[in-house]
Every structure is written in C-alpha cells, then in structure tokens.
Amino acid sequence: MISLLFVVAIIIACGDLFMGYVIALSNEPSQEDKTTMKRKKVIL
C-alpha cells in the first residue's frame, strides 16, 4: 500500500517536471507563469 502511494507520487512529480520542461521550451517563463506553477504545486 505504501509502495503504491510512493510510485504514484513519483509519477506525479515526473509529470510536473515534464510539464515545466515543455513550458520552458515553448516560451521563456515570465514571473506570472512562475507564480502560476507555484500555485499549481500547492494545489497538488
């Protein structure tokens, strides 16, 4: 049970890093984008 939650947490973290990487490639993140990402991380 604990290991399953650990795997899910890793998948979510990797997905978050991947999205950040894609956003960084598509356009240079402005201050607004950075605060939005922080808010999304807090929500998750």
Image (cartoon, rainbow, N blue to C red):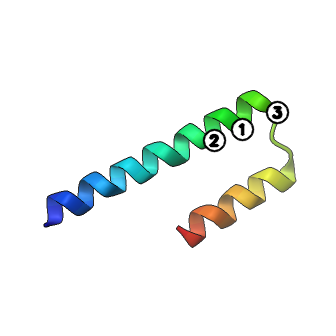
Q: Secondary structure at mark 3?
A: loop
Quadrant of res 27: top right
Quadrant of res 36: bottom right
Work out whether 2 lies above or below 10.
below
* Label placed on residue 27: 3
Most extreme residue toward the top, as rendered? 25
Residue at numbered disc 1? 23
Count neighbours of disc 1 (C-alpha within 10 A) and say few if under 14, some if 14 to 19, many if 20 or more.
few
Residue at numbered disc 2? 20
Query: Do the CB atoms of the residues marked 3 and 1 lie less than 8 Å apart?
Result: yes
Residue 8 placement, left or right of 44: left
Residue 16 image point, x, y percent = 53, 48
CA separation, marks 2 and 3?
11 Å
Image mark count: 3
Count neighbours of disc 2 (C-alpha within 10 A) and say few if under 14, some if 14 to 19, many if 20 or more.
some
Three-letter amino acid code at the position of disc 3: Asn
Three-letter amino acid code at the position of disc 1: Ile
Residue 21 placement, left or right of 25: left
